[in-house]
Amino acid sequence: MTRNAGAPSALAVETSGVTVMIGDLPILREITFQVPRGQLLAIMGGNGSGKTTLVRTLLGLQPYQRGKVSLLGTELGRFRDWSRIGYVPQHGESAIRQATVAEVVASGRLAKRRPFMPASRDDRRAVARALERVDLTDRARSPFSELSGGQQQRALIARALTGDSDLMVLDEPLAGVDLGTQDSLANLIAELNLAGLTALVVLHELGPFAGLLNRAIVLREGRIIADGAPPPSMTTVTRPPID
């Protein structure tokens, strides 16, 4: 798929006055922020604060009634280059649980292929590279359903990587995995960010991301109540990158 013409935008994400209503209930209220390319940004808040609705709105999965959203310099309604956006949902979709790990990861290349065309050599190489980056090469033929929670998250990250994404959005990647795996996942995402990937990570709390983040946006009742450096009281020492 051809990338958008012209000079690349310095912004990965831009929103202005975004409001989301479900019925008469406001879920997001006048959300305005910008994400420069190369940031590792947390979207934080308690349950019901609007975190998941916000990322779904950014990805065009949730309609918004007012405001403006742009991705990689293109207004959302005109954006078509979805291979540049990687999305890692909170839980693996039930439809992929009976697929093998390699099949799940390979599905990330579908946006780059013509319909009904078989995988090319480039597709296979991209899948192999992504599996290697998340340390799942030896599980390529295993059923996705047999992986641990942390391994499933790694497989979904690999799926997002196969499209050579410029922006990755992760919804609660640490949910349901043990503390050691949380550290490993956080360091993997930070390593990808250091390599140039822009990442938006939905978090309930900083946990192992403390010291790794560039910035945090905090939501409450659908409004941004803080935007800047992660709160010092929630920050610990920086963790080293994974091997």
Image: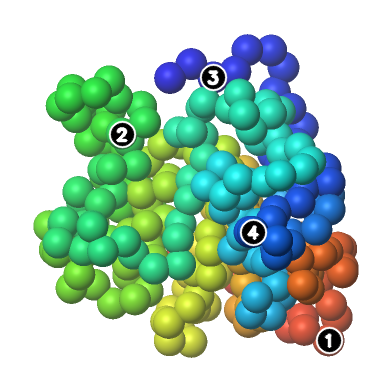
In the rendered image of this protein, does residue 207 appear above or below residue 155? below
Question: Image point 46% across, 57% down: which residue?
Answer: 88
Amino acid tagged 4:
Gly
Q: Which residue is mark 1?
A: 233
- Residue 137 coordinates in the image, percent (x, y): 23, 57
Q: Earlier in the sequence, mark 2 or mark 3?
A: 3
Q: CA distance from mark 3 to mark 4?
A: 36 Å
Amino acid tagged 1:
Ser
Amino acid tagged 3:
Arg
Question: Image point 60% across, 45% down: which residue?
Answer: 63
Q: Nearer the viewer, mark 3 or mark 1?
A: 3
- The outermost residue toward the front is 24
Q: Specify few, some or many for label 4: CA neighbours under 10 Å numbering under 14, 14-19, or 20 or more.
A: few
Q: Quadrant of the N terminus?
A: top left
Horizontal relation, residue 4 to residue 118: left or right = right
Q: Specify few, some or many for label 2: CA neighbours under 10 Å numbering under 14, 14-19, or 20 or more.
A: some
Question: Image point 48% across, 87% down: which residue?
Answer: 179
Q: Which mark is residue 110?
A: 2
